[in-house]
Amino acid sequence: MDEALEVVDVLADSGFEGIVTWALRLLGLVVLLAGLGMWLFTEAGLLVLPALLILGGLVLLAAPSVLLVLAEFA
């Protein structure tokens, strides 16, 4: 976890924090939509892979904000 906070701190100092946070949010949105698409448009019901994709997409949507807050406190 310390390494991730260090990387976020370096990115914040270099001015690329906005680009990285929006890239992670966009990736999270794509993963979330892929999981929802697999769940809604297939007749298999809620399987493990769509559930993991949905959860992973939600984490990627929230992770940049949480990492930046933790980097400010560290």
Image (tube, rainbow, N blue to C red):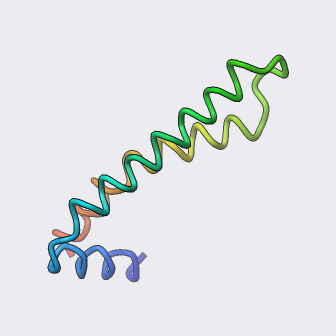
Quadrant position of the C terminus in the picture: bottom left
Q: Image height check: is 17 above or below 62?
A: below
Q: Image height check: is 43 above or below 57?
A: above
Q: In the depicted view, which residue is nearer to us: 16 or 63?
A: 16
- Residue 28: x and y in percent read 47, 46
Q: Which picture quadrant has residue 45?
A: top right
- Residue 56: x and y in percent read 56, 47
Q: Which picture quadrant has residue 49?
A: top right
- Residue 63: x and y in percent read 38, 54
In screen coordinates, is 38 left or right of 34?
Answer: right
> Which residue shows up at 22% across the image and 66% down it?
17
- Residue 61: x and y in percent read 40, 45
In screen coordinates, is 11 left or right of 59?
Answer: left
The total of numbered circles placed on residues is 0
In screen coordinates, is 65 left or right of 40?
Answer: left
Quadrant position of the N terminus in the picture: bottom left
Q: In the depicted view, which residue is nearer to us: 73 or 21?
A: 21
Q: In the depicted view, which residue is nearer to us: 44 or 70?
A: 44
Q: Image height check: is 55 above or below 72?
A: above
Q: Image height check: is 17 above or below 65?
A: below
In screen coordinates, is 34 left or right of 27?
Answer: right
> Which residue shows up at 46% across the image and 50% down it?
27
> Which residue shows up at 15% across the image and 72% down it?
15
> Which residue shows up at 66% across the image and 43% down it?
52
